Image (spheres, helix red, strand yellow):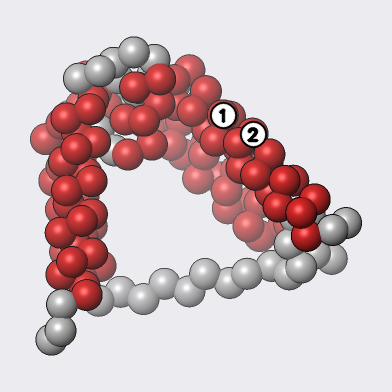
Amino acid sequence: MSAADKTVARMLATLAAGTLFGFGLSYSTMIRPEVVLGFLRFQDFGLMLVMGGAVMVVMLAYKLAPRLLTRPLLDDHFHVHPSTWNRDTAMGSALFGLGWGLCGVCPGPAIAGLGAGNWNLVWALVGIALGALVQGLRARAPR
């Protein structure tokens, strides 16, 4: 398979995964901020099942795929994604959680919600983009 074929295959796989993800968010009603806020207020536990199911599928895929396949379908090797916790990670997590709790929106469902015609989510996406921009500028600043 040539490099151009691999690129096209990766792009199609990314498109398919994003479409499936957006459909799942829409089908589970996670694109509706009032449903998410009901979940965060412990009034509706349906999203807990959705999120728990998603976490289980991803955990199984990350644990089983390297054991069942000699290499990934669209890459040369499996990648390790180490995480490090520091002050910036804790602060970013707290700000993300605060924003999620205040408006019931996170980036994936907000974009999927736009696709469903909920144009009020534009404001949340503007806030998310501004927060990412500020963080990027802060990370680049000399210390």
Q: Residue drawn at (13%, 46%), measured in percent from left and top?
A: 98
Marks 2,1: beta carbons within 8 A: yes
The x and y percentages for residue 86 are 25, 76
Residue holding disc 1: 19
Q: Helix or strand or loop: what does disc 1 sit on? A: helix
User: Depth check: 102 or 139 in front?
Assistant: 139
Q: Helix or strand or loop: what does disc 2 sit on? A: helix
Looking at the image, residue 7 sits to the left or right of residue 92; the answer is: right
The x and y percentages for residue 99 are 15, 42
Residue 67 visible in the current orientation: no
Q: Residue drawn at (19%, 62%), measured in percent from left and top?
A: 135
Residue 78 vertical placement versus 12 (above, below): below
The residue at the far right in this view is 1
The x and y percentages for residue 117 are 34, 13
Residue holding disc 2: 16
Q: Residue drawn at (31%, 30%), measured in percent from left and top?
A: 110
Q: Amino acid at mark 2?
A: Ala
Sort mark 1 into few (<14), some (14-19) or many (20+) by Cα contacts within 10 Å: few
Looking at the image, residue 65 sits to the left or right of residue 106; the answer is: right
Q: Amino acid at mark 1?
A: Thr
The residue at the far front in this view is 4
C-alpha distance separating marks 2 and 1: 5 Å
